[in-house]
Image: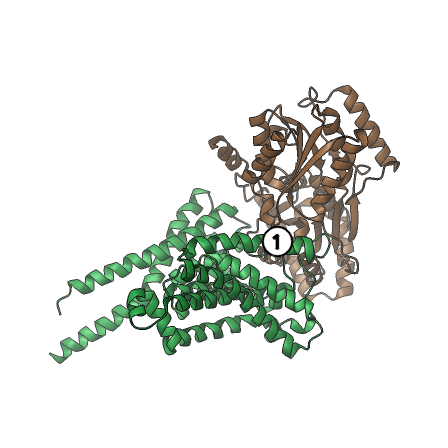
Amino acid sequence: MKRESERIRHTRTPVPASFLPSTSKVLVALLCLLFALSISCGKKKEDAARESAAKAERSGADLKVGLVFDVGGRGDKSFNDSAYRGLERARDELGVSFEYIEPGEGSDRESALRLLASGEAGIIFGIGFLFTDDINAIARDFPHKKFACVDYSVTPGQEIPPNLLALKFREEEASFLVGAIAALKSKTGKIGFVGGMKIPLIKKFEAGYVEGAKYVRPDIDVLVAYAGVTANAFKNPSKGKELALSQYSKGASVIFHASGSTGLGVFEAARERNGLAIGVDSDQYEEAPGHVLTSMIKDVDVAVYEAIKSVLDGTFSGGVRTLGLAEGAVSFVYDDNNRTLIDDEILDRVQQLREKIISGEIIVPST
Amino acid sequence: MSSASEQSRRFQAARKLAGVIGVPAVAIAAAFAAGAVFILAIGESPVSVYGRLFSGTFGNFYGLGQVLFKATPLIFTGLSVALAFKAGLFNIGAEGQLYIGTFAVAWVGFTLSGLPGVLLVPLCVLAGAAGGALWGAVPGYLKSRFGAHEVINTIMLNFVAIALTGYFVTHVYFVPETVHTQRIAAQAQIPRLEQFWPVFKGSPVNVSLFLALGIAVAVYFFLWRTRFGFELRALGLNPAAAEYGGISVGAGTVLAMTLSGALAGLVGVDFVMGYKYYYEGGFSSGLGFMGIAVALLGRNHPLGVVLAAFLFGALSYGGLVINAVVPKELVEILQGIVILVVIAGTNVFGQLAASFKRGRPG
């Protein structure tokens, strides 16, 4: 318990407020001032012309990125941390600066987006489907700023403003592959799934996982449980542990979780029962070394990084973008850590399935 | 002789004023001083963090609007808890009551969408009050009929309310891929203050703020100017004496919890009719519990509740403003310290004043 809390605290070490040498900071400040002035006195046409001229010579140093995290916040070792890695990579490789907010209650999400949009940030990210309506409205209020929303939920009939990039993942494709691995690995003929909040987005993970398992082993028994029906279901490790212990007791040999920091409890249970678990979003091997069969990777960091890069390149455009196996945005972990857990026969089989999904031979259902 | 008594009267008046205004002010200052130590400890400058806190909240109209917006639901939940306190009941169930009330507002808003606004707006408001009232009446009845303690029952009913509304919004009434219901009818939506005062542009503060203030006045009149109010206060002061005086303890308990729940349920007017225009799962993370702190700090008086709600609203939004420079944990520590010092400090200073008074001859 103590170890756990120390580790979490360690990952939350505050980021130094300044990453830039002071001269370039002054430069940033001047550019921002210029930017603000030109917006305040500019006509639309002039603005557009100026913007396109600026695009060509934009370097990272004059872009500030704002990001608002999802409910779980930083330190969830998963979805939010993956987004944060994207920010760090953009800072290191592109030289951008960033600021972020971790909202508390529901209405904070909108306030936080608005706060960042009215500040210096040139592009503002909302991490998670809960931002959908808020970011759509705020993108309209700030037409000069760019917005991106990871897991944006597209509603038919709702128009997406041209300055908003809706990033979506085909999680079911990679879930299909880890489902196949779990089924092939299972000696008991039973595997488990622990979801966070019971919503269509998480159902995609479940659907792909079940489909993949049944594809390679039609007689497999998949136990399914969800941690709850509110956003808290994504940050309830004790509930996660309880559900996982129950599934292990019923004979499940592998459990896949898609539940934010609730999943930390699933790994705890895997350690305790000497079972196997499958991580989600990021490589979660470190959570329970030796007990993490693989992790279904959703490269939120790649999506965040690419979106920032497109702003610098001047290639940013709004609209929906879905990313799956073919784009390399979802995958599963196979490296030195888990090589001993997944033998070559299983790996070959799964790689074949991967090719079939990419070629369109297998179409994975999302519900 | 006369000048001495004049002086003493003046001294007393000044001391009373100092007690009402000065004590919380000193407590808040002490809290900020304590917070400064934490800010220094993580290597930030308290001056710049606090500067950002104040300029973000009271430095512009948008920030002010956000503070008012954050304060609105806290006025409702603070009044809810305070009214129950006055009747000697500890309502920890405001959270559950506001979940049920808010869902009821939305349900009426999108189900009876054919009705004209003149009917639909009051119906939605009543639905919120009725939903909360129902959820408050149950523990009230259990207490009066079976003597089951309201603290336990209201806590348990919180879980039931959150799970029940959560079930509705994920299984029955939801827009696919979201955790919210469909929108309420356009004529059920109430105006935002930015429509009258464009300086508030962007802030969702809406006319339910005036409803909250009006309800605060109504609660005052109810408690201190009506027979029922008198009876509830008598129950709170001494149930046995009240019963001896002809007041029904059972009926009073049910009435107090019902009204308390109704006040909490009105949070839905702000959230659904004035802000999101739909019900969203998990929309409140502790507004009902914050109501307890608001009521305590406001000393269970409607005016005190309103002022305390503004303070907590400012802390809540201010915390978000400084989150960009300091970690979220520090923001929460700051808020916790302010609450702790203000509540504990007020009592300590109050006791000091009381002992000072006792020590004075005459």
Q: Is residue B94 visible?
A: yes
Whether residue B194 is situated above or below residue A240 in the rendered picture: below
Q: Which chain contains the residue that carries disc 1?
A: B
Question: What residue is at 59 percent from the left and 24 percent from the top?
Answer: A274
- Image position, residue B6 (x, y; %): 18, 77
* Residue B126 position in % (x across, y down): 57, 72
Q: Quadrant of the N terminus of chain B?
A: bottom left
Q: Is residue A115 left or right of residue B30?
A: right
Colour mode of the rendering:
by chain
Residue at image location 78% in from the left, 36% down from the top: A211
Residue drawn at the location 20% of the way across and 60% of the way down: B355
- Closest to the observer: A75 or A101? A75
The residue under label 1 is which amino acid type?
Answer: Gly
**Quadrant the C terminus of chain B occupies:** bottom left
Q: Name which quarter of the figure residue A172 lies in.
A: top right
Q: Residue furthest left?
A: B1
Q: Colour of chain A?
A: brown
Crowd band around label 1 with a 10 angstrom C-alpha radius: few (<14), some (14–19), many (20+): many
Res. A367 image quadrant = top right
* Label 1 secondary element: helix
Relative vertical location of residue B175 with respect to residue A4 in this rendering, above or below: below
The chain drawn in green is B
Residue position for label 1: B166
